[in-house]
Image (cartoon, rainbow, N blue to C red):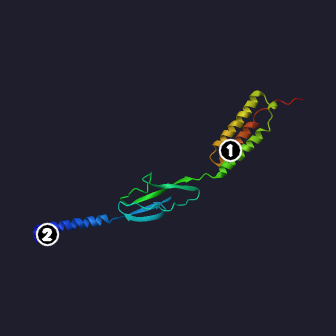
Amino acid sequence: MSFKKTTILGVLLLFLALIITGCGKKIVIKFETIDGIIVSEQTIKKSGIPKEPTPPIREGYEFLYWEINGEKYDFDKEISEDATLIAKWQPIVEDTLKDKKLQALAELEEFYNTFKKEDYTTENWNTLTNHYNDGLVAIDAAEDLEAVDDALQEAINNMESVDKLPEEE
């Protein structure tokens, strides 16, 4: 075999070896929940597609999806280098907040019904009614249990502060 043929054959074999070695490269995909906790790890071929792991569990939260580089990851897309997918969560709003609001609205209505229109001037009755309506809105807008209690108490205090007509003797 001539030197030229040997050189060409050698280059071709080297090129073929590089292709085979490069094609067989593996990458690592990590699945992270919070604070760097890795819940799953997969080794896949470069430019491969990882399998979606079982959704993780976090108390008080609902798992939404996995994200990569701040965007939702589509498990039909290839990944060409080592990567970490991070769990995206949403807090679970307990029904207790809804129940607390309903209870507070009922208490406020019951308190409002203890007042009699004839005991107030028209202006003061309107003020008392406005405090009641403001309380309804504040309770509905409350984002946690403490805010519901605060809104109810403020409405009651405001309603109690409205002056009645002087009592007749």
In the rendered view, would you say 99 is above or below 47?
above
Seen at 73% across and 44% down, the residue is: 106
Q: Which mark is residue 150?
A: 1
Q: Residues within 10 Å of mark 2 (few under 14, many from 20)?
A: few
Residue furthest out toward the front: 76
Seen at 65% across and 49% down, the residue is: 97
Percent across and percent down for residue 66 are 47, 56
In the rendered view, would you say 153 is above or below 121?
below
The image shows a total of numbered marks equal to 2
Q: Secondary structure at mark 2?
A: helix
Q: Earlier in the sequence, mark 2 or mark 1?
A: 2
In the rendered view, would you say 168 is above or below 4?
above
Residue type, numbered disc 1: Asp
Percent across and percent down for residue 36 are 47, 60
Q: Quadrant of residue 136?
A: top right
Q: Nearer the viewer, residue 4 or 112?
A: 4
